[in-house]
Structure formats: C-alpha cells, structure tokens
Amino acid sequence: MEEQVTERMIIRGTPEHCYRVLTAFEAYPEWAADIKSVSIDERDADGRAAQVTFRAAAFGRSTSYTLRYDYSGAPGELSWIQTNGDLTRRLDGSYELIPSGDGGTEIAYRLVVDLKVPLPGFVKRRAEGRIMGTALKELKVRVEGPG
C-alpha cells in the first residue's frame, strides 16, 4: 500500500544554493549517510542528470533504485519518479523550494512510497519519518555548512 508523506524544514541558504546541492547527485555519498553510491545513467539535452541509480542502506540491508528526474518546475521544484527498485515499487517525490526571507528557504519534501514487501503500518511510518527527517537534516547541514 502506498502513502504520501510530507516534511518541511527551513534552511539558511537561498533556493538557488539548495537547488544546486540537491542536483549535485554525485556528491550525495559525501553528505547523505544512507547513500552509498550514485551513478548518472542518462543526461538531458542541458547536461542535467535525467536518470540516476542510487545504492543505499535501508532496513538493515543494501537497496538499489533508479529515479527519473523532472526539471520542468526548476529551480523552484525538483521532482522524480522511480523507474526501477529492488525493495520499492514506487519511490516518487519532490522538493519544493520556497523563499522564506533573510536568504532562507523553506523546503517541502514529498514522498510516495510503495514497498514490494509488506510491513506493518507503524514500522513503515517510522521508516518513512526517519528517511525524510534524516534527508532534510543532512541537506540542512550540507547547505548551511562551510564552503
């Protein structure tokens, strides 16, 4: 069963800076603890990563999934759909970047998850909350950190 979850966070960084960090996929293993490797499988006519395969730690094991990115809402939104996954049927989502004043950005992270293996609802909700909360906290550290 699929569910959509949304988390929001204010980050001290411009929407443009947040967007650059979010689209620098090759750098994810440097700052996103659960991401072990990233491979750009395809680029669009503008040289942006159109299809990206991730290997990540999840549920105590390694998982792999491929996402196709949509830049039609750029730079205010980055969205994606899953095209392949070993544990997930669906891992579709988006980041909406909303200027919040004083050079900050409110990020709304939306994710639709459908696992291939059924889990009890409370376990799935706890995992979704951890994934989204950790992703936003790590993004915040990366954007607000030095350099």
Image: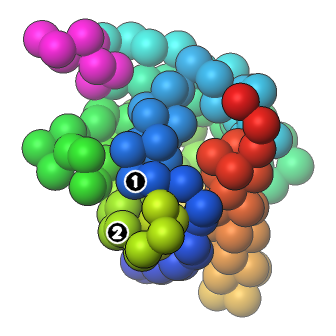
Q: Residue furthest front?
A: 102
Is any atom of residue 81 visible in this view?
no
Question: Which amino acid, mark 1?
Answer: Pro
Q: Residue at x 36, y 61 (%)?
A: 97
Q: Quadrant of residue 47?
A: top left
The label number, if any, that marks residue 98 in the structure image: 2
Q: Are marks 2 and 1 in contact (CB under 8 Å)?
A: yes
- Badge 2 amino acid: Ile
Q: Residue at x 69, y 50 (%)?
A: 144
Residue 32 point in image, percent of width and height? 73, 41
- Whichever of callouts 2 and 1 sits on the residue coming sooner in the sequence is 1
Query: Where residue 79 appears, x then y in whole percent?
Result: 29, 50
Numbered badge on residue 119: none
Foreground pick, 79 / 82: 79
Specify the label residue 15 is tagged with. Answer: 1
The image quadrant where one finds the C terminus is top right
Closer to us: 124 or 24:
24
**Magenta residues, as a range?**
43-50
